[in-house]
């Protein structure tokens, strides 16, 4: 079975974080035919064959945004992205259980 997706089936996914989880998600989602922008503070260190950008670029690109960051910084990262996602229906998912919602951030 082919993992290739048609342009209609491919999702645009922004991933914030390039640790083990972020890298694995980017690699797997790209292999499955999705379009991924991965945020990295150190773009040269990213081994995945994906587009690398800033947090804001990844957040604005994605139909879905995944926060693949440690639980202790999820609130700060989500707050930083609030403006980038304001007025959109882009769902944001965290790889860590935190109970943080954009609507509750000030």
Image (spheres, rainbow, N blue to C red):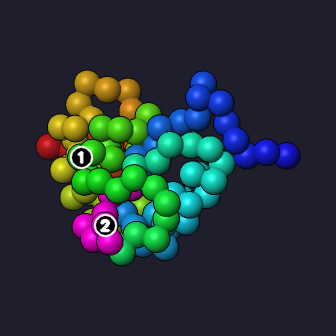
Q: Which quadrant of the view contains residue 92?
A: top left
Q: Between residues 16 and 30, which one lies in front from this camera angle?
A: 30
* Residue drawn at (46%, 55%) of the image: 50
Q: Is residue 20 above or below residue 90?
A: below
32 left or right, relative to 97: right
43 left or right, relative to 15: left
The residues bearing labels 2 and 1 have C-alpha atoms spaced at a distance of 15 Å
Q: Locate the C terminus and report the quarter of the image it occupies.
A: top left
Q: Secondary structure at mark 1?
A: helix
Q: Which quadrant of the view contains residue 85?
A: top left
Q: Between residues 73 and 64, which one lies in front from this camera angle?
A: 64
Residue at which label 1 appears: 56
Residue at which label 2 appears: 43
Q: Is residue 92 above or below residue 74?
A: above
Q: Is residue 37 visible?
A: yes
Image spot of residue 93 (x, y percent): 45, 48
* Residue drawn at (65%, 48%) of the image: 32
């Amino acid at each position: 079975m082919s993992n290739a997706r048609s342009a209609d089936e491919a999702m645009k996914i922004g991933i914030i974080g390039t640790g083990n989880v972020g890298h694995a998600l980017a690699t797997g989602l790209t292999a499955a035919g999705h379009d991924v922008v991965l945020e990295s503070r150190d773009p040269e260190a990213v081994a995945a064959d994906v587009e690398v950008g800033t947090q804001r670029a990844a957040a604005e690109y994605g139909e879905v945004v995944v926060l693949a960051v440690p639980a202790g910084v999820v609130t700060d990262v989500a707050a930083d992205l609030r403006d980038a996602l304001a007025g959109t229906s882009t769902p944001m998912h965290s790889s860590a259980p935190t109970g943080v919602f954009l609507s509750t951030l000030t």
